[in-house]
Image: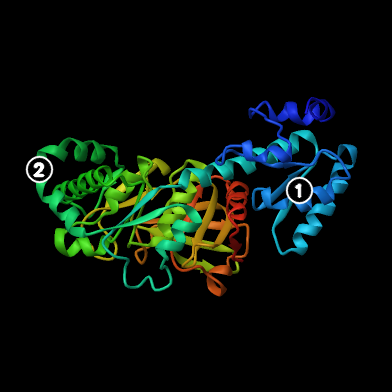
């Protein structure tokens, strides 16, 4: 192994700036811990037959690392062609040393994100909204593919906690939140106290049930509690707990994935208007993590004209639109764009973000993965693409 290290020292030293490197002969692969990050390194030519005879030990999807020295790239190309002939995915990481190191880092980030999802608990509080007819998830398949668990929780669990919380317990927090707002429209102090009580009730449930994310059946709450979940979802997302509304099972998994890959909160929105000529999308909803915006206005809820909603005012900048969909959570949409304007239309939910996409916006009209899509601030397409491809998902265009 020392001879191999010396022969490829430039690449290995570049990788050792970021990783503790172990070179392991393929005959000793069983000595590598099951959860360790590993990759096949092609050190020279002439190994093609050996690799194919032992390709079952390679981590899948198969990634071959080759710096090109000693005919290693030629071998990697032959191996890759053979693997593809078996209808299996394979890719080669090759190029200048610095570029290879960046590709390995991106590859590792996706690996680490997938590993972090294992055992995550998604609380489904209530039931998905009846209008989400294309947003179902097979719990068993989701667990097998992603390692997550969907936990069904009755709304009565929220109601019980809600009624036990006094205004004295949440008065200070409500006041602090109100003081941070740019303005307060259409909502009363009593509305704010109720919304803060609901946040506390859901937060208690997250702790007691050890939830890592929640999908809230928010419309069902309005009739029982005369308040909305928009404030609760905003604050939970601020705290690093992905939280989505309408009980959307696919959207909350997308938000959890986005958090795992980027470590950032995200915005779940309705595509409310599509302008094909200008290639623009209007994404709107009544809740957004206040961490994501420069300013926010406390409003009432758009559809019910009750409770509390958040009108977030986000600064212009690069954004990423992402959605993981299908019942098996094995398809996705991904695009980058630029957030150009905060609109204030009377016909849409309170937070309204106009986005100019870098890909044809016609996807939303011709081949959409349902309604809700997720927005992240910044450009994250490369890392999300790597993550989804490692997990053998199909890109929807």
- Residue 341 shown left or right of residue 289 in the figure: right
Image location (x, y in percent) of residue 209: 27, 47
Crowd class of label 2 (few under 14; some 14 to 19; many from 20; radius 10 Å): few
- Residue 167 shown left or right of residue 124 in the figure: left
In the rendered view of the protein, which quadrant contains the C terminus?
A: bottom right
Number of the front mark, 1 or 2 = 1
Front-lying residue, 164 or 357: 164
Q: Secondary structure at mark 1?
A: strand
Residue 348 visible to an observer of this rendering: yes
Name the residue carrying label 2.
Answer: 166
Mark earlier in primary sequence (1, 2): 1
Name the residue carrying label 1.
Answer: 92
At horizontal 51% and vertical 43% (from top left) the residue drawn is 262
Image location (x, y in percent) of residue 344: 38, 58
At horizontal 69% and vertical 58% (from top left) the residue drawn is 89
All told, the count of numbered labels is 2
Residue 306, by quadrant, is bottom left
Q: Secondary structure at mark 2?
A: loop
Image location (x, y in percent) of residue 371: 44, 67
Crowd class of label 1 (few under 14; some 14 to 19; many from 20; radius 10 Å): some
In the rendered view of the protein, which quadrant contains the N terminus?
A: top right
Q: How is the image coloured?
A: rainbow
């Amino acid at each position: 192994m020392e001879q191999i290290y010396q022969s490829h020292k430039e690449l290995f030293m570049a990788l050792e700036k970021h990783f503790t490197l172990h070179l392991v002969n393929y005959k000793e692969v069983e000595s590598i811990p099951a959860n360790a990050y590993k990759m096949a390194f092609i050190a020279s030519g002439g190994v093609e037959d050996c690799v194919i005879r032992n390709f079952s030990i390679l981590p899948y999807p198969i990634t071959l690392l080759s710096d090109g020295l000693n005919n290693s790239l030629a071998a990697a190309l032959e191996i890759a062609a053979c693997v593809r002939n078996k209808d299996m995915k394979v890719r080669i990481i090759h190029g200048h040393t610095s570029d290879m190191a960046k590709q390995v880092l991106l590859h590792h980030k996706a690996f680490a994100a997938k590993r972090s999802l294992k055992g995550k608990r998604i609380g489904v509080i209530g039931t998905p909204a009846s209008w989400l007819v294309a947003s179902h998830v097979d719990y068993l398949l989701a667990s097998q593919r992603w390692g997550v668990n969907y936990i069904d929780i009755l709304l009565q669990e929220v109601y019980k906690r809600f009624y036990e919380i006094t205004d004295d317990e949440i008065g200070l927090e409500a006041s602090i939140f109100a003081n941070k707002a740019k303005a307060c429209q259409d909502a009363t102090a009593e509305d704010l106290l109720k919304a803060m009580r609901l946040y506390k009730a859901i937060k208690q449930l997250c702790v007691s049930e050890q939830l890592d994310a929640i999908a809230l059946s928010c419309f069902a709450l309005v009739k029982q509690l005369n308040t909305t979940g928009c404030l609760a979802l905003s604050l939970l997302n601020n705290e690093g707990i992905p939280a989505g509304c309408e009980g959307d099972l696919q959207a909350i998994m997308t938000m959890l994935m986005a958090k795992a890959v980027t470590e950032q909160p995200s915005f779940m929105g309705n595509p409310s208007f599509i302008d094909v000529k200008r290639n623009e999308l209007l994404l709107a909803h009544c809740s957004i993590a206040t961490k994501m915006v420069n300013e926010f206005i406390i409003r009432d809820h758009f559809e019910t004209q009750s409770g509390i909603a958040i009108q977030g005012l986000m600064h212009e900048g690069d954004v990423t639109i992402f959605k993981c969909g299908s019942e098996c959570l094995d398809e996705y949409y991904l695009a980058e764009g630029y957030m150009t304007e905060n609109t204030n239309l009377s016909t849409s939910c309170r937070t309204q973000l106009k986005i100019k996409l870098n890909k044809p916006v016609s996807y939303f009209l011709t081949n959409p993965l349902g309604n809700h899509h997720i927005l992240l601030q910044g450009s994250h397409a490369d890392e999300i693409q790597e993550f989804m491809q490692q997990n053998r998902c199909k890109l929807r265009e």
